[in-house]
Every structure is written in structure tokens, then in C-alpha cells.
Amino acid sequence: MRWLFAPVPRGRIAAFRTVVYLFAALDLVVFTPWVRSHANTPGSLYQPLLVGRLLHLPTPTPLIVHAVFWALIVLSLAAATGRAPRLLGWAVFVLYFEWMIIAMSYGKVDHDRVGFLVALAVLPTVGRCRFGDKTLTSAGGWALRVTQIAVVCTYFLAAWAKLRFGGADWPLSAVLAQAIIRRGTWLADQIAVVPGLLIVAQFGIIAFELLSPLIFVVPQRWRWAAVAFFYSFHLMTFATITISFAPHLVAMTSFLALEKVRPIEWARRRLGRAPAPPPSPPSPAPAPTGPSPAA
């Protein structure tokens, strides 16, 4: 229990909250704008996820889709300011949850949003936090910890799914080769011609995902390196097969000491330390006009 509720500075929660809510608004216009097309999709094609069926959520209509879209943008930007954290936080979570039900009830279900959804669900439980506040909060520690657990479960359960549906031969399959054929980049084409490299990469992916829970037991100085490796893994994934895990990467900032990143204060400090203009040199004294003393 002490590990689950390990306190963190309130400033870290304030920064994490701003990052999460700003991304929620950005996601609608950059990463998932295609969801709005479901406003005109025939209702007969809507096959709600299990949670949608349990909650008896309505079939998306133009009014529902557009209302969720605009309300979510406005409320996410408002929540990013830190005001009314519980009221705005719960509203954003409910609307984004419905946005994901609308998005994923017509086919493929993305697994890169589990950690982000958990972050949206737990942030309203923390309450008000301010940037730069070094006061420790156990509620904030719990919110970050369960988000971290969701992030790691995304990796571990992905490996479990590979082995469950692909079998022990998954690392020997042509999964990466097929992905490169479908959406590979120039870098992927250079890698694919190296004999055996894709097979080695698939073994490495399985090992990385299965061992990801070890991030909770390694020393802190190694934990930063592990998080950096997580980010580099996704950078390589995007550089080779253009698959973006943007919401997952946002949730993964729960591992970082975000309270130390304060761009506004940094900018003010830099502007305040701007060198003053050098003083102008004193004007020379006028030369004497009368006779010299020797005269």
C-alpha cells in the first residue's frame, strides 16, 4: 500500500494534468478527427464494445458525435488550466470515454489508449494542485501509480495477446515484414534487407514487453533509462512503420518528474537575466581656451 500511494509533489500533478488535457483536445483534431465521420455512418454498422452494451449507450447520431466533439474540446482546454479539477475532470473523462466508444465500435480496437483513459479517470480524484507546489500528496501518488500500471499492462498484455493468438511461433513469423510491406518507410526498407534482423527484432519485442513490469523494481537511476528506452522504442516504431502511440506516450509521462519542467518560469527567468545595454562612455571634457599656465 505504501508503494501504491507513494506521495508526489502537487506540482507534478498540475503539470501532468495540463499535459493530459491539452492532448485530449489535440487528439480530436490531429489524431482522431476521422471519428467525426461516424456521424454519417449508418447505425446498422454500429457494434458497440462490451462496455457500451452494458451501459446501454445510444447509437451515434450527427447530434451526438458533433456535440461530444465540441464539448470535449472546450472542456479539455478549460480543464488544462487547473480550474474546477473535479467537475471539469469528470466531464472530460465521460466525454472522451464516449468518444472512444464511438471510435472503436466499428472495427479495430486500438490498445494505445488504455493508459490515457486511466489517467483521465483518476486525475479528478486528486483535487486542486498548483504549479511549483512542493507539498506531497498521496492521492496524487496513487493517480500516477495506477496510470503507470496501465502503461506497463499495455506492453505486457500485448505480448500475452501475441503469444495467445499467434502462438510460440509468433517471433518466427513474418509480422514485421508484412507491416513493412504495407506501411514501411525508407528506413524500414533498409532494415528489411538485412538477413535475420526482423526475426531478431520480433524476439526483442516479445522480450521487452514481457519484461516491462521490471521497471517498478529497478533502482530509480535505472528507471529513467528504462523510460527513455520505452520512448525510443516508439520512436523507432514510428520511423519504420509509421505507427503512432501518441496517447500512450502522454500517459507514460506519469513516470517523469514533470514539476521540474516549467517553461513559463524558465522564459521569465531568461528574460529577466537579459544583459542590460552597456552604459554610454562619458563625454570628453572640453579643451581649455585660455592661456596656458606656462605662458
Image (tube, rainbow, N blue to C red):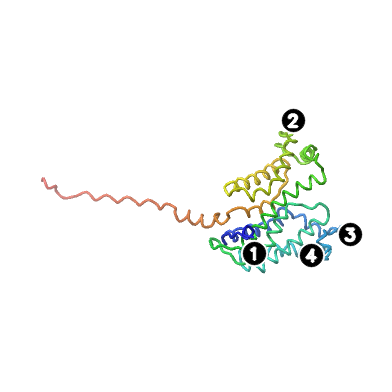
Instruction: Say which of 163 and 294 sits in front.
Output: 163
Cα distance in 3D space between marks 1 and 2: 51 Å
Cα distance in 3D space between marks 2 and 3: 47 Å
Which residue is at the far front?
1
276 vs 147, left or right, is left
Q: Name the residue under label 1.
A: 79
The picture quadrant where one finds residue 258 is bottom right
- Given this view, does label 4 or label 1 mark the residue nearer the observer? 1
Cα distance in 3D space between marks 4 and 3: 16 Å
Q: Is residue 221 above or below residue 173?
A: below
Name the residue located 77 percent from the left edge and 47 percent from the top edge. Answer: 160
Looking at the rendered structure, which numbered label has been put on residue 44? 3
Q: Name the residue under label 4.
A: 64
Q: Which amino acid does label 1 sit on?
A: Ala
Query: Mark 2 falls on what kind of element?
Result: loop
Cα distance in 3D space between marks 4 and 2: 51 Å
Instruction: Say which of 220 and 11 sits in front.
Output: 220
Q: Give the quadrant of the N terminus.
A: bottom right
> Which badge, 1 or 2, is on the more N-terminal residue?
1
> Which badge, 4 or 3, is on the more N-terminal residue?
3
Q: Which amino acid does label 3 sit on?
A: Ser
Q: Where is residue 155 in the image (x, y as percent from the top left)?
A: 72, 49
Instruction: Say which of 92 and 215 sits in front.
Output: 215
